[in-house]
Amino acid sequence: MSNTRENTSTGILPTSELAQHGGSGAVASLPSGPRRRRRTGWAMRLEIALLAGPAALVFIAFVIFPVVIAAYYGFFRWQGYGPATDFIGLQNYITILEDSAFQQALWHNFLIVIGSLVLQGPVAILLALLLNRKMRGQSLIRVLIFVPYVIAEVVVGTGWSLMLATNGALNGMLKNLGLDFLVHDWLSDPNIAIWTLLAILTWKYVGFAVILFLAGLQGIPEELYEAAALDGASYWQIQRRIALPLLGPTLRIWAFLSIIGALQLFDLVYIIWGQYVASTAGTSTMATYMVANGRNAGNFGYGNAVAVVIFLISLIVALFYQRFVLRRDTAGAITGDRRTGRKNR
Amino acid sequence: MSAFVAVPDAPDAPGVLEAPPRKKAKGLPWGSPTVYFVALVVIALMLAPIAYIVLGGFRTNSQITVDPAGFPNPWNVQNYLGVLTGGVFWQEVLNSTIVAVVTTLGVIVLGLMASYVLARYTFRGRGVLYALFAAGLMFPITVAITPLYIVVRNLGLMNSLGGVILPQIAFGLPTTIIILVPFLRAIPDEIQEAAFIDGCSRLGFFWRMVLRLSLPGVITVGILAFIASWNSYLLPLFLLNNEATFTLPLGVQAFSSQYSVDTAKVLAFTSLSMIPALIFFSLFERRIVGGLTGAVKG
């Protein structure tokens, strides 16, 4: 598609030059269109290989190949050393799906996906709408909201786990305020821990959503607001009827990123709860299950099989989402950028 | 693409054109008090945990035990001095810096070259190549970590920074290429035509024009790669077992389990370890925010 586009654009250029400068310019540039296409000869192939080769090599060696061997080792009982010989077919996968610990982890992932969308989405939309106006200090406010997103998961995890410990700062503060009935074991109580995790996730990632939404809002032409205001629409009417619908594509992409991130969640859980506490406190995820039962248990065949399961679940969710939600928006973003490309030419 | 850089500033542009004196004289107008109040509450919530970490480092353990939520009284710099004068912290800062800088350079160089091919060459298999890189978005490091560990071990790169750097470059490429390709495509054909007419080869065009014209995109991509590398935890956790090769995130965790009774010292170590990323972020905040915009508009 862009193939033809490029040819038409190079085709148009010389003719306009022809009109302006007469013959000489056209003679120089006209043949270049067809010649370039024919010249996919050895010289150009060499250039392509030289430029794209290193990236493709590194990418295949460290991204594609590992995923392929994960699928291979997933069929073996293998401790990680020597060649894998103990072929056990689908046994690893059967064990995973029957393991109640994995089912719990899957359920936690599901809760985290829903919780992230439900908590972060509305909060971020409200904040973005509120901050989407020209006023003093707007860039400072934006930066400060974004700070938690930039800080390493390890730092965040260490800080929060100290703060939320039974004798930590939060409980201390509640006691100082005389709110003793609110004191809880925020991290170890299985009824509360998942909510604590959701709160920390919201704190860490809501800034990202706000920034995305602000960017999306700023892409909306100001004329639309002015026209609506002229027609007598109130502030909230404008936000609801104009800003929100036009924010749709940004919202859908954010939700996609959030869902995939939630399905793969590892760092914060592993740092705050560790592999053992995570399962008793009810915050284990598929990824912490994978690390605990694969690498940490020395059972690499099994760990690879869990990786494949996580990947397939993410893939299915992603394909579903793209098929039914992102259909319109991603015509450009994922498949070669058709819309925006045309706009610019 | 063009929106990529321009979007954050776009709404200001017409105002600047119509009434430049007003903007210069008074700056932006004040918002309503409600907005500032809500913003203040949100910012307080955002910064409170960070303040807890930083202030906690200035307290002593007995202060923390007596009142976990109090302020430092008196202020005590021993924890920070202890961390700063010990060799462990600086070794880990050095390791993290090496990994982040080399990763960033690798992502930029390889990503830019590949994006240039994908954006401005027409050849059979281009769509496949692009789809291959784009598919990388579907393989987050979490999924690939167990097999990646095996690959890196077979290459003999365990416990070396190179073993962390190479996979990080590979995993940084999809985002980089998806951001840079539209960017390079947006360079007007006229410029390329003119360069070719003047006898510039495609490769020459790459070195002389593309590098300069795509600088904003390159900076964005570089910042994203740097911060991702600086904060990366899972990969070093699998690949680095030797304390001498630890990066900061591993160091923070090792430190906090080693000194688990010395809360104040852990807090000091933790808050020092977030300073570099915060400095980096505040320097390039505009670029980062602009880059995320571009990633979404992609």
Image (cartoon, rainbow, N blue to C red):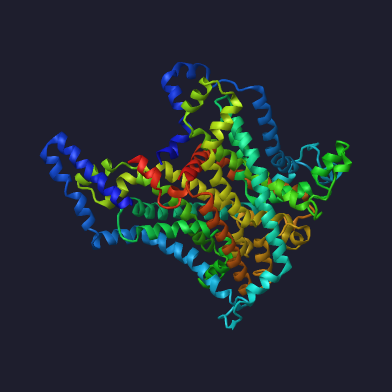
Q: Residue at x 55, y 70 (%)?
A: A70
Q: Residue furthest left?
A: A23
Q: Name the image quarter holding residue B240.
A: bottom right
Q: In percent of the image, x 51 and y 49: which residue is there?
A: A326
What residue do we see at 64% from left, 77% from top? A91
Q: Residue furthest bottom?
A: A85
Q: Is residue B75 left or right of A61 when viewed as pictured?
A: right
Q: Nearer the viewer, residue A113 or A298?
A: A113
At horizontal 51% and vertical 50% (from top left) the residue drawn is: B225
Q: Nearer the viewer, residue B174 or B215?
A: B174
| Any part of residue B97 in sight | no
Q: Position of residue B103 (x, y in %)?
A: 49, 55
Query: Where does residue B88 sit, x and y in percent of width and height?
Result: 65, 55
**Residue A181 screen position, x and y as percent:** 88, 42
* Image x and y of residue A246, in percent: 52, 36
Quadrant in which the C terminus of chain A is drawn: top left
**Residue A26 can be seen, yes or no:** yes
Work out whether B223 lies above or below B133.
above
Relative to the observer, which residue lies in front, B35 or B67? B35
User: Closest to the observer: A100 or A173?
Assistant: A100
- Decide if residue A144 is on the left or right side of residue B69: left
Q: Can you say whether A50 is above or below A241 in the image?
A: below
